[in-house]
Amino acid sequence: MRILVVEDEAKTAEYLRKGLSESGFVVAVAANGLDGQHLVQEEAFDLIILDVMLPGLDGWQLLPIIRRHCQTPVLFLTARDEV
């Protein structure tokens, strides 16, 4: 299973990459929304873990772009303290 993690916080991205890789998943990491957009357009993923607050394109701006290319499940990840 291939997972894309779009997360600008390097420590969080590495923590997710390492943990998911150790569980047998193939993980790609993008550090901003534009890099995430590029990867979604170039590769197929089984799951996308998407941060809400990203430089370039934020998660809410990136989601419609993702939907134009695929119906891959998206799990939002955020440190925000409100819904």
Image (tube, rainbow, N blue to C red):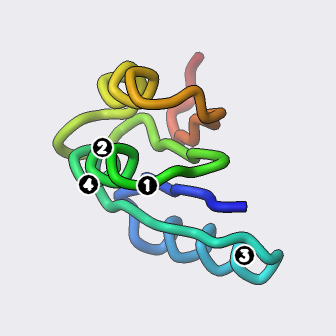
Q: Are marks 4 and 2 in contact (CB under 8 Å)?
A: yes
Give the amino acid type for the residue marked by disc 2 in the picture. Answer: Gln
Q: Give the vertical position of 77 relative to 8 (above or below).
A: above
Regarding mark 1 in the picture, which secondary structure is present there?
Answer: loop
Give the amino acid type for the residue marked by disc 4 in the picture. Answer: Asp
Q: Which residue bears the numbered disc 2?
A: 37
Q: Position of residue 54 (x, y in %)?
A: 30, 43
Answer with mark 3 or mark 1, whichever residue precedes in sequence.
3
Considering depth in this image, is 78 or 45 the residue closer to the camera?
Answer: 45
Answer with mark 3 or mark 2, whichever residue precedes in sequence.
3
Q: Give the vertical position of 31 relative to 60 (above or below).
A: below
Q: Which residue bears the numbered disc 4?
A: 35
- Image quadrant occupied by the N terminus: bottom right
Give left or right: position of 82 versus 42. right
Give left or right: position of 32 versus 50. left
Q: Position of residue 65 (x, y in %)?
A: 33, 26
CA–CA distance in space, label 4 to label 2: 5 Å
Q: Which residue bears the numbered disc 3?
A: 19
Q: Which residue bears the numbered disc 1?
A: 43
CA–CA distance in space, label 3 to label 1: 21 Å
Give left or right: position of 80 versus 34. right
Answer with mark 4 or mark 3, whichever residue precedes in sequence.
3
Answer with mark 1 or mark 2, whichever residue precedes in sequence.
2
Q: Are marks 3 and 1 in contact (CB under 8 Å)?
A: no
